[in-house]
Image (tube, helix red, strand yellow):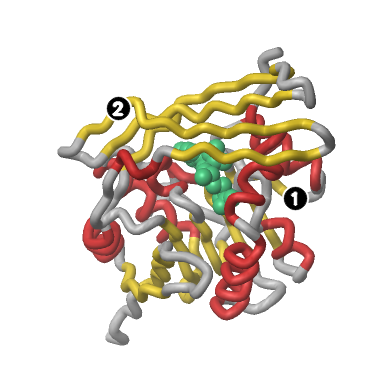
Amino acid sequence: MKTNSAQHYDLVYNAWIGPDKTKEEISLIEQLTPSGSSILDIGSGTGRHLIPLKQKQYQVFGLDSSEEMTQVLKSKDPQIEILPFSLLEQKKDSIMSTKFNLVLCMWNTVFEVALEQRELDNFFESAANLLTPNGVLLINTTDADDFEPQTEDFVHMVEHQSLEYKMTWKLLDYNPETSTTVAEEQLIVSNRFKQKTQESRRLITQRHWRHDELVDTAERFGFVCNLVRLSSTEDKYFIFRKKRRPIS
Ligand SMILES: C[S@@+](CC[C@H](N)C(=O)[O-])C[C@H]1O[C@@H](n2cnc3c(N)ncnc32)[C@H](O)[C@@H]1O
């Protein structure tokens, strides 16, 4: 009966996110870089952005720490290239042959990728090395400045083909000093007789980086930030561009 939640991720979360937010995000990306350019999505998940972007003729590349999420993405489009995790370890002096016009890190993925300041430094350093000189880094997070961990808990139900999918997100631990949470994501699938047919649980640790922490760190790695808001969500969209070097 045990399963992984990745196989039902789209069904549950796409319904939760709704189509408007993803559509608006894709339009923002189209404004940032023209069709044909190369895009790396860090924490590409099941391809919420990469699949529509590939249909719009972008060259898309994924990267995700979860084998299950990557498998779902591959099952939807086997041609999408998944790059090795080690790409995020690129240091300044390494010779990188692959550079991207846009690096994406959407829907709080940066909260999972970087749990300590050292990891956030590493993230921005790698992003700077992975981008072309005029490249753009787009990070999307919920607003973490007035973070209240208890309000994060939710239960979300979806009915599909006579099955009920119940996703529960529950806070287990919170460190107020670092604004780090450990939450349990539980998915229960039940049939029309209310019998459980599948169940999965996973723990997700997130550090809810504040606006100034993200921007200050990015600045140390040569980025300037422009904040954008969309009409369909209260999320923040941080657009980081590399500072232009003065001509000597
Ligand atoms: C909230 S989901 C977002 C998925 C997708 N970007 C979206 O917007 O629908 C976070 C994703 O980041 C991945 N992830 C978590 N930690 C990661 C890490 N250290 N490196 C790469 N991916 C990571 C997870 O496996 C998951 O697919």
Disc 2 on helix, strand or loop?
Answer: strand
Instruction: Please name the residue that numbered disc 2 is placed on.
Output: 173
Task: Give coordinates of residue 182: x percent, y percent.
Answer: 36, 30
Secondary structure found at label 1 = loop
Which quadrant holds the N terminus?
A: top right
In this view, the residue farthest toward the front is: 193
Instruction: Specify which label sits upstream in the sequence, 1 or 2.
Output: 1
Identify the residue at horizontal 39%, vertical 67% (top origin): 238
Quarter of the C terminus within the rendering: bottom left
Task: Judge by depth and name the residue closer to the eye, 85 or 231.
Answer: 231
Whether residue 119 is visible to the viewer of this picture, yes or no, is no
Quarter assignment of residue 41: bottom right
**Crowd rating for badge 2 (residues with CA inside 10 Å; few <14, some 14–19, many 20+):** few
Question: What label does residue 114 carry, if any?
Answer: none
In the rendered structure, the answer to whether residue 230 lies left or right of residue 52 reads left
Q: Nearer the viewer, mark 1 or mark 2?
A: 2
Question: Seen from this angle, which residue lies furthest left?
Answer: 177
The residue at the point 64 percent across, 78 percent down is: 34
What residue is drawn where x is 30% and y is 54%? 144
Q: Within 10 angstroms of label 1, few (less than 14), some, or many (20 or more) residues?
A: some
* Closest to the observer, 232 or 215: 232
The answer to whether one can see residue 5 in this image is: yes
Q: Label 2 amino acid? A: Asp
Pinpoint residue 211: horizontal percent, then vertical percent: 27, 61
Horizontally, residue 39 falls left or right of residue 88, namely right
Whole-percent x, y for residue 92 in the image: 37, 54
| Residue that mark 1 sits on | 80
Image coordinates for residue 212, horizontal then vertical, percent: 22, 61
Relative height, residue 20 to residue 194 (above, below): below
- Using the numbered discs, state the Cα–Cα distance from disc 1 to disc 2 in whole angstroms: 36 Å
